[in-house]
Image (tube, helix red, strand yellow):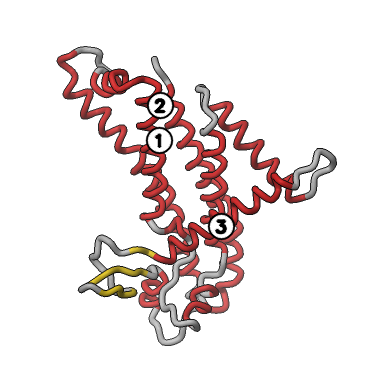
Amino acid sequence: MAEAGLTSGEYIVHHLQNLTVCKANGEWVWNQCEGNFYAMNVDSMFFALFLGLVFLTLFGRVAKRATTGVPGKLQTLVEIVVGFVDQSVRETFHGKSNVIAPLALTLFCWVFLMNLMDLIPVDWLPWAAHHVGIEHLRVVPTTDVNVTFAMSISVFILTIFYSIKIKGIGGFTKELTLTPFNHWAAIPFNLILEGVSLIAKPISLSLRLFGNMYAGELIFLLLALMGLYQVPLQLMWAGFHILIITLQAFIFMMLTIVYLSMAYETH
């Protein structure tokens, strides 16, 4: 429930502030980093790394204990996820690479786990953090545009890398300058068109995930202000939000596969 003594606007603003740290006047300061380019959102970094470790530990343990007989519930769940991702890669990616499937699996599970944090009641962890002296805490890393941009930029770098690796510098340059109009006079137009299209990929990839998760978090905060009606309303929204959480992880994975598949195309 909303903290006593705060107006509705103050409550929402309070919950939308990250735990930040930065260096000012030669000293490290907390939550006084507005406008500081080098500020770090500690809560986003912590939960993103923690959930990444959870994914690696869980899947690693299942892989080590996998049996050929009747699998347990956890192994069955992991096999379903791995099979689903593998099928998605086979249907979408037409090149040959040992990196794409593991990358797709990692992105899908990692983004899903980060999104899943949105189902924790909005006041629980911030309330616990308040009692140990932490005034601001956001627990959903994908509601931080810095996190989603970091992931999309990583995908963008891989796309450029494989484009140059498969097509060569000359082939990649021709793709930017002689597409869609294969004539030297159209090179400036082609370069602008393809350049915008290339840059739009990481921007749209990050902002789509950020926007949907940020909106979901905001709705949970609004429902928390509704007093006695908040519990049934939050349960209803949480049931629907599970679909959004899964869908956003799937979209991020699929667009990554599509972009890397395009990088492997040589025609």
Badge 2 vs badge 1, beta-carbon distance below 8 Å: yes
Identify which amino acid the numbered label 2 is placed on: Ala
Provide the residue designation for mark 3.
Answer: 116
Q: Which residue is mark 2?
A: 263
Question: How far across and how far down the image is residue 137, in percent?
Answer: 44, 71
How far is mark 2 from mark 1, CA to CA? 9 Å
The circle on residue 158 is 1
Q: Taking 225 as reference, is 44 above or below it?
A: above
Instruction: Evaluate whether residue 241 shows in this view.
Output: no
Q: In the image, residue 236 lies at what x, y percent?
A: 60, 62
Left/right of residue 74 with respect to residue 19 in the rendered view: right
Q: Which quadrant holds the C terminus?
A: top left
- In depth, the one of 191 and 53 nearer the eye is 53
* Spatial separation of the CA atoms under disc 3 and disc 1: 26 Å
Q: Residue furthest right?
A: 69
Residue kind at label 3, given as amino acid type: Leu
Look at label 1 and name its amino acid: Leu
Residue 6 screen position, x and y as percent:
40, 83
Q: Earlier in the sequence, mark 3 or mark 1?
A: 3
The mark closer to the camera, 3 or 1, is 1
> Residue 162: which quarter of the image?
top left
